[in-house]
Image (cartoon, helix red, strand yellow):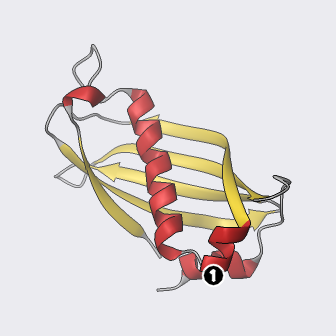
Amino acid sequence: MRFIRSFTAGPEHIDVMGHVNNAVWVQWVQDMATAHWDAVARPEDREAVVWLVVRHEIDYRGNIGPGESVTAETWIEGEPKGAKSLRRVDFTDANGRVMVSAATTWAMLDRESLRPLRVRAEVLAPFRAG
């Protein structure tokens, strides 16, 4: 199941080059993951686990300026490996061109002990539905 949301560049997002700063794109990647988790995860999973970023890989193919918007689309890609799961996020402009594409590896941790947990199929099942 893919999750979609829009972002509009405000003055606070713009760097000296006149477009969205790379740190803002990273924040938007994280915002997408968090919003998708909050919207789709089972309540018992939201209570039991937390996720930690272990790797970001981002390709910048374009950018947007103040007042311009992008549509972000995120999904879980492939199968988990132990405690790790890969999430993709693509940001497209009004013409459907991908501006930024990210692959983020997240590790699932037990909320109380903060120890890694193997990602079980039932945790990802709601994200695969639809």
x and y percent of residue 19 in the render?
A: 25, 26
Please name the residue that numbered disc 1 is placed on. 125
Q: Does residue 93 appear to the left or right of 114 in the view shown?
A: left
Residue 13 to residue 39: above or below: above
Residue 107 to residue 63: above or below: below
x and y percent of residue 127 in the render?
A: 55, 76
Residue 63 is drawn in which quadrant? top left
For the view shown, which residue lies furthest in the top direction? 16
Front residue of 98/6: it is: 6
x and y percent of residue 87 in the render?
A: 57, 57
Which residue does the image show at 74% across and 59% down from the upper left?
108
| Label 1: which secondary element | helix
Which residue does the image show at 59% across and 64% down from the upper left?
77
Residue 15 to residue 65: above or below: above
x and y percent of residue 130 in the render?
A: 46, 86
Residue 45 is drawn in which quadrant? bottom right
Q: Does residue 85 appear to the left or right of 68 in the view shown?
A: right
Q: Amino acid at mark 1?
A: Ala
Which residue does the image show at 84% across and 56% down from the upper left?
116
Q: Does residue 47 appear to the left or right of 101 in the view shown?
A: right
Front residue of 62/70: it is: 70
Front residue of 82/62: it is: 82
